[in-house]
Image: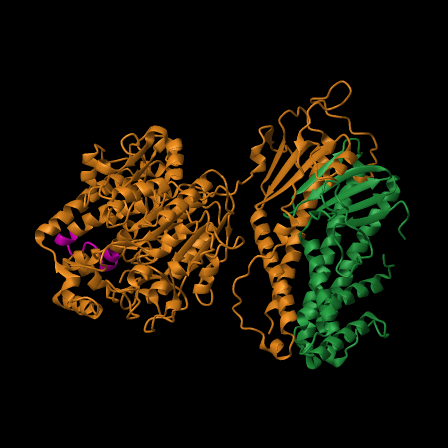
Amino acid sequence: MISRDVSFSVSGIDFPDGVDPLGLWQVEKYRISSFTVDASPLMTESVWRIQLPDTLEEAQNIMQSQQYNIEQQQHYLDIIESQLADYNPKENYNLSFVTDRDSPLATLQSSITEISAWSTAYNTTGANPDYIRLYEQCETFLGRFKDIMSLQRRIETRTGQNLVGLTHIDWKGDYKTIWEKQATPPAMHLHIKSVNLASTSRMVVLRIISTAVSGALSIAIKAAIPGGQILLIPAVYHFVSDMLRELKNIPVHA
Amino acid sequence: MPSLPEELREFFQGKLVFNGINGVTGEYGQPPMPVEQLARLINGNPTHTDFQEFIAHQKHLSSLTKLGQRLEKISDEQLSVLQSADETALAENKFKKHFQEQIKSSPVKPGSGDPAKVQDVGWAVLFPAEMHRTLKERIKEALMPLLDLRQHQAGDKFVIYEGEKGYQPDERKDLFFQRLHIREGAADPNEMPFYVMLVGTPNEIPYRFQYQLDVMRGVGRLDFGNDIESYAQYAQNIVAAETGQYTTPRRAALFGTANPNDKATQLSARYLVDPLYNNLQNATLENNITLTAPWELLPPIVGEDRATKSTLSYILGGHPDLTPALLFTASHGMEFPAGHPYQIPFQGALLCQDWPGPGSDIRRDYYFAGDDIASNAHMHGMIAMLFACYGAGTPQLNQFAMQAFKVREKIAPQSFTATLPQRMLQQGALAVIGHVERAWGYSFISPSGDLDNQAFITALRMLMNGVPVGLATDPSFNLRYAGYSSDLSADLEELRWDPTYLTDYELAHRWTANNDARSYIVLGDPAAKIPLEPFTDRAKESSEMVTIVPPEPIVSPDVESSDTENIPPTEDAADNEGHYNEKQPIKVTQHPSQKEKTSSPTPLPDPLSADEFHVAYGLDDQFNKLRESLRAFTDQLATSLKGAARDIVFLDVETFTADDLEAVSKAINAGQMSTAKMRALTRVAFDGDVQVFIPKQTITIDESVWKIHTAMVEEAQKNRAQFLKTMAELATNLLGSLYIK
């Protein structure tokens, strides 16, 4: 449970299905810069903000715990990847630890069946609204994916009221860190952990997307779904995210 | 046959095949011949059979002109005039070869300054003396922005050679020099500037004069005929490039055909283009010029499914994310019989991979010529090198026939400039290096099987470093020409006495290498250079920074040591109140605008056919849009990966401190400058070398900041490695999605 003194938030990007699959980061709506003429958001970078208690020991424990969680989720992702590779929709193969109708697998199977049906029943004289909805979903997915991948990042760490450090990472991976002159070494090391946590979180999300892409491809081939390798990406991503939550049993930040 | 590696033997088995395909017959322009025959012809000792074959070939080509109009026996007197002109050139080549070590460092007279700078070595324009006065004045007026620029740069070393001082018809270079009191030998800019731009057709100022002048100078030619507007446009483009009105990204492309069953292009693809690509990927390579900044090399566009006409159209289409600043091509050039209606517009056109190989008809959509460049194509800032027969132009007479058979063979009604480079210059390119006459194409493999492509490598590397084109060809092709020319002359003399002095292969190699090197010319201003984007080497840019090497490995401190004392301020530049007097403003680098960065690069043509399955099920339009969107994104990802791979050469980690970090954060949010003091910069090279920089004024290094900085360096290194791994996996998966049928 994350306390009131603690928060992990990100602005400037959104996760592909609107929610952090790791269950850690809360998405803040885009900050509007004061100097822009119009109200459109300035989207040159994403900002990852970590608020920690001003008690050093408590802050360190929280960071350690979150780092452990991320490592666990990477391990779960390995499992999900191999299960997806073995999954054959035509054989209704059940993943060993999921059985009920609202399970991630059932949801995925339902999506596969729906998209597969369109390919034999597509109305060529008019637009299929469900298909259009899926198409828009794919477009949104792709747009959010681009942002996560390509925007440069800024990571800020606060302990209590104090901004300890600010690190700017450009798209090449070069780091620029500005420290509060009065910051203590332990507080500075907390910020280094924050940078690690934010960077690893982003990497894991990209890895989830990569898993969704390869999973969609595998399913599309096995189920012989035309266009499935792209159309199934959001559904498989959703499946992977749901599986991670199930495995971790974490609450979802809406 | 000399000893050759096995894989090369197949290329040298049977007859030698030369560059150039006849657009009417679809056959080789120069019929393939055994190396022994070539050796005889080089020596000027054809057998009766050789001559008969030559005449038969001429009859075959003379469908539009009578044989008598194509061939004309040269009298001994005429031959001796030609030979004396050659001897002058030979003398200069011997001089150049003799002083080649000096000339490699500077081709101008010692004390003349930097040959890369127009202000040191001067710039001249040379008009034909007999150019129509009105035309000349109009051309000068059109070129005025360029002439003004060069005059401003060169000062009293700027010269216009025109009228009496212009080039007299059929004048030999040595006589031209004598007339204008210019001494032979190393260029003295006070007598004649180093950079000389010829303005006029090759009828008005012959190619031979250009070759000879080019031996000791940087020479280029501008020939748009009567098209005044093209002269004006070109001048404006050069001025815009030189005055920094635009820059080009460091991107190079290598294009090489490997037509089926065609030895000439199989050889050039495998032993010229591929090795060039491998060489140019390395910024630093022993015995090679070091590249001063990293370049993006597009994957080599070679052979099947890649080196097609449509791909070349794309590359030369001016797409900002694809068009290279430097282009090298290797292919057959098109030939047409003298006077054929296609000769002027299409001779020298690049025969692309679309041609199925010898024995096939030639179709117009197999070769890329001037009018294949779209009128809205922009090649601003490009310099191109075209290895193809007649790629730069065609002389009226065939030099080879003169040497081999002592006949003048008219291969064109008059000498002319090829339309493809002309068009490229009209569409923004700054210069094109190309071949006049046939390119012989065996010159980059020595008889021992070693690669002999250093001339190409040197020229390309110099261009990539922003060296003027007239200078870039100097230590490469000109020096090579000088060397081979003087050696060849001596060899031919020896062979008269001792026929075993050289093997036929050795002779063929030297001769083709000599001809290839001699006949490269520059079209465009010889002082033109690629207007490269500035490369910021941050480690060197600040005059406030010095380099130090850490005295010992730094170990990250134990977090649990719970040292809660405040970091004492360092004593440098602090006033009594502990405030820092020096504020070093920093600007947090803003990434190029979102629109710019995520705009979809135009992808290469999809080599796969349309997905009929999807069309049949009616999912075409929307699915295709989605697929194209994903494809564009994947191309962007690939570009980012390439960029990352290029930029992985260095990883920079900077550490600053600020008195009020909240204020800095707000300033960044508002997109404003902020103040923070840089404390350290670490640059980690890909090979593991580490450089550390601290501000010059720093008297003592703050230990705690230093330790934190080092910890951040480790973090950055881990992050980059992980990022590249993840991106590579992602790209692989995305590509799989795009190309599944």
B649 or B58, nearer to the observer: B58
Residue B287 seen: no
Question: Does residue B303 appear left or right of residue B553 in this picture?
Answer: left
Vertical order, B594 against B158 (above or below): below
Q: Residue furthest front?
A: B134
Residue B114 image offset from top left, x and y in percent: 38, 33
Residue B459 seen: yes
Residue B542 image offset from top left, x and y in percent: 59, 31
Residue A46 image offset from top left, x and y in percent: 73, 48
Vertical order, B712 against B499 (above or below): above
B203 or B142, nearer to the observer: B142
From the image, which quarter does the N terminus of chain B lie in? bottom left
- Range of residues picked out in magenta: B494-508
Residue B303 image offset from top left, x and y in percent: 43, 65
Report the number of discs.
Answer: 0
Residue A232 forms part of the magenta stretch: no
B25 or B575, nearer to the observer: B25
What hue does chain A carry in this figure?
Answer: green
Chain represented in orange: B
Q: Quadrant of residue A175?
A: top right
From the image, which quarter does the C terminus of chain B lie in? bottom right
Q: Main secondary structure of the magenta part?
A: helix
Residue found 29% across the figure and 58% down from its top: B440
Q: Quadrant of residue B511?
A: bottom left
Q: Quadrant of residue B443?
A: bottom left
